[in-house]
Amino acid sequence: MASDTSSSQRHRERRPGARPTPLPQELQAVFAVYERGLTQPSGALDAGTVRVYASRVRQYLAWLAAAFAAGTIEGDPLTEPAARDRAARDYRTHLETVARRKPATINSHLTAVDDFYRRRGLGPAAAERADLPPTEPRALDRDDQIRLLREADRAAPRDKAITYTVFYAGIRISETAGLDIGDVRLPADEGLLIVRHGKHGRSREIPLHPELRTALEEWLPERRGWKGAGTNSALFLNRRGGRLSARSAYTVLRDIAAAADLPLGRDGVFTPRVLRHTAGATMARQGADIALVAEILGQSVETAGRYSLPTDDDRRKAIERLTIDE
């Protein structure tokens, strides 16, 4: 069945420039419709997620084609909910027993399959996910947040605005560096940040937190006096008048975190991604719908769902509640 070809096909897909997994003509048309919807400018997925979903849905369709040829498929999984569910469950079994994928990878494949079926109007398939050990993304605790923001308040307006943008909008460091002046909308009240990502020009709108709005209002007048301000559209400039690079923006955040006495690096408390996780975890813990958190952060619902997982502090408090006063 698919086991004769799927492994080598997957390896070819992972190499830049390699040919994609081949599909029969009728499934090529199905995939083309899915890919067009996936890459629409209005989509909320980042470029990396788009590539992964497209690759994994193509692999699923290739497996379907092999299963059709082997006569192991009942009904039409592309149009019938019951057949969809059976096919998704069989595909999970294939990933576990033939492809020998790890649980996290299996779940990621099933998430892409669910996205495929949602876009076809059938909704997600009834296929249970593989069991995973519960892990929550690392986020700053309240004390570390306070120390970081206090140190950012002491920084120059540009560097404060960079820190506040990552912290209060939860966007990636590359997205922060990619912001243009026109991406900041400051009407009389509230405001929006337009975050553009991916080669297809997709964007998402993030309401401005009041603290972020204030930081941007402090930076924008100063920016007018910087070299390149009249010719460069970048929101954050470097001293030479060019767009501040993601690497340099990371240096700004790292220096502020170091001044706030936060441990740095892979095993420390602080990385730029931690600020993004902090935004996601805070929204989730304050009751925001996970689908909304995913939309704001430009993530999949599965990824954003990790922000609602219990932390070590949650577990400690749960145990402490077992105390009974005599």
Image (cartoon, rainbow, N blue to C red):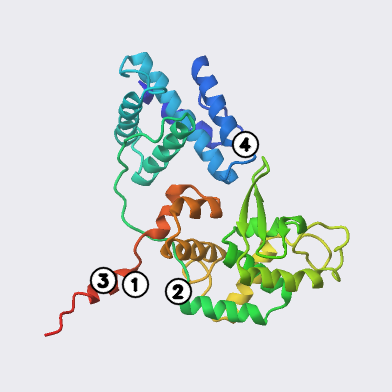
Residue 40: numbered disc:
4
Image coordinates for residue 123, horizontal then vertical, percent:
41, 34
Q: Secondary structure at mark 1?
A: helix
Q: Which residue bears the numbered disc 3?
A: 318
Residue 27: numbered disc:
none
Residue 141: numbered disc:
2
Q: Nearer the viewer, residue 302 or 132?
A: 302
Query: Residue at 33% across / 18% down in the picture?
Result: 75
Q: Quadrant of residue 311?
A: bottom left
Q: CA distance from mark 4 to mark 2?
A: 37 Å
Image coordinates for residue 266, horizontal then vertical, percent:
50, 66
Q: CA distance from mark 2 to mark 1?
A: 10 Å
Q: Nearer the viewer, mark 3 or mark 1?
A: 3
Image coordinates for residue 79, horizontal then vertical, percent:
41, 22
Residue 313: numbered disc:
1
Residue neighbourhood size for the residue with mark 1, other residues' Cα within 10 Å, grouped as few (<14), some (14–19), many (≥20): few
Image quadrant where one finds the C terminus: bottom left
Mark 2–mark 1 CB contact (< 8 Å): yes
- Three-letter code, disc 2: Asp
Query: Residue at 55% across / 39% down in the picture?
Result: 51
Q: Secondary structure at mark 4?
A: loop
Mark 1–mark 4 CB contact (< 8 Å): no
